[in-house]
Image: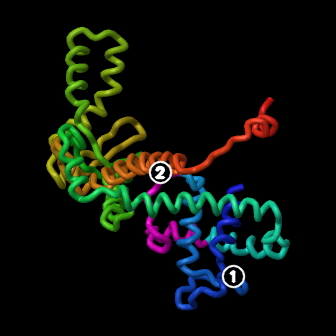
């Protein structure tokens, strides 16, 4: 069904691969030239269909979406497959098929409504920088517990975790992987548990203490480490080692505005768009003449 909808979206978009600018061609299949724009359009249509043309989103205009090379290669494969299938569908007369035409018309209406929301209503509710700042400054919002940014490598031997850590650091530097966060808010609870177990623990509490000891000690050592220091290698059991490099210690406090700005904007826009849509529908209903034929409705859908 999803492939069928993608076929419809391609027909709607008027995709004619052979007419794309030659200087931007990224692949050619038989007489079909595929460009970077075709890939971006396919990704945009895929996102639209997955949201079923009804979810509020803050999509960038066509041609401005960002994707890495792995995503682009995957989308290219999908675009090639869809282009070949589209040609077959055209040969089979699908462009004039009654079911296709009905679905195209229905999908077109849904696209028009969603585009109106994303473009017209979006501009009406988009918050200003001052409004974003005001939302950010509210007390108690966007707090974060003390934690460390770390690179953590797991392996079955001490040498394996050292090698793996070096590989991960290279991935971090190239932006292929994000730093892990280790929070410290459970340390005080773990300390109390140790004290309780030490003062009069039973067999189950002793087992629990043994299970948690390695983890809590590791978190404690990371908590005390300075930026750039290594914690480990630590042998957790017979076949598991871990090595951690502390990149940065982050104290408890308010998250930076730049870090949460997009989150604030997204939440505000989603809330405002829902209300703007409800208000617009209410306004249109007041000025519209709506007649519901319940007899026919019951005949079609009643018991």
The quarter of the image holding the C terminus is: top right
Image point (70%, 62%), residue name? 105
Residue 73 on the magenta segment: yes
Confirm whether residue 63 shows in the render: yes
Residue 79 at x, y = what percent? 63, 71
Up-down relation of residue 279 to residue 22 (above or below): above
Up-down relation of residue 138 to residue 84 (above or below): above
The CA distance from mark 1 to mark 2 is: 47 Å
Residue 301 at x, y = what percent? 77, 36
Query: Tag 1: Cα neighbours inside 10 Å, few (<14), some, or many (≥20)?
Result: few
The residue where tag 1 is placed is 29
Q: Earlier in the sequence, mark 1 or mark 2?
A: 1
- Where residue 20 sits, quadrant-wise, is bottom right
Task: Judge from the rendering whether residue 42 lies leftward or rightward of residue 98; answer left or right.
Answer: left
Image point (23%, 33%), residue name? 185
Give the magenta-colored segment's residue range: 55-76
The residue where tag 2 is placed is 280
- Where residue 247 sits, quadrant-wise, is bottom left
Q: Which mark is residue 169?
A: none
Residue 34 at x, y = what percent? 61, 81
Confirm whether residue 162 shows in the render: no
Residue 58 at x, y = what percent? 43, 59
Name the front one of labels 1 and 2.
Answer: 2
Up-down relation of residue 105 to residue 296 (above or below): below
- Where residue 177 sits, quadrant-wise, is bottom left
The quarter of the image holding the N terminus is: bottom right
Residue 247 on the magenta segment: no
Of 276 and 95, nearer the camera is 276
Image point (18%, 39%), residue name? 139
């Amino acid at each position: 069904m999803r492939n069928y909808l993608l076929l419809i979206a391609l027909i709607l978009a008027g995709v004619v691969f052979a007419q794309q600018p030659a200087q931007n061609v990224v692949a050619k299949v038989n007489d079909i030239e595929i460009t970077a724009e075709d890939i971006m359009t396919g990704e945009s249509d895929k996102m639209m269909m997955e949201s079923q043309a009804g979810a509020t989103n803050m999509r960038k205009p066509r041609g401005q979406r960002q994707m890495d090379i792995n995503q682009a290669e995957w989308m290219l494969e999908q675009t090639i497959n869809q282009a070949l299938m589209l040609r077959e569908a055209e040969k089979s007369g699908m462009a004039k098929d009654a079911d296709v035409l009905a679905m195209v018309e229905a999908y077109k209406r849904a696209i028009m409504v969603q585009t109106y929301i994303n473009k017209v209503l979006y501009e009406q509710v988009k918050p200003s920088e001052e409004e974003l700042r005001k939302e950010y400054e509210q007390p108690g919002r966007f707090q974060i517990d003390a934690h460390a940014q770390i690179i953590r490598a797991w392996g079955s031997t001490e040498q394996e975790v050292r090698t793996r850590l070096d590989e991960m650091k290279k991935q971090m530097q190239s932006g292929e992987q994000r730093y892990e966060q280790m929070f410290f808010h459970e340390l005080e609870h773990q300390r109390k548990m140790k004290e309780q177990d030490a003062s009069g623990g039973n067999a189950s509490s002793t087992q629990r203490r043994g299970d948690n000891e390695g983890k809590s000690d590791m978190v404690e050592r990371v908590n005390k480490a300075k930026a750039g220091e290594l914690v480990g290698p630590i042998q957790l059991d017979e076949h598991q080692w871990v090595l951690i490099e502390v990149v940065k210690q982050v104290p408890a406090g308010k998250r930076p505005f730049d870090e949460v700005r997009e989150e604030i904007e997204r939440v505000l826009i989603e809330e405002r768009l829902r209300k703007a849509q409800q208000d617009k529908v209410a306004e249109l209903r007041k000025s519209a003449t709506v007649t519901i034929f319940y007899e026919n409705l019951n005949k079609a859908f009643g018991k």
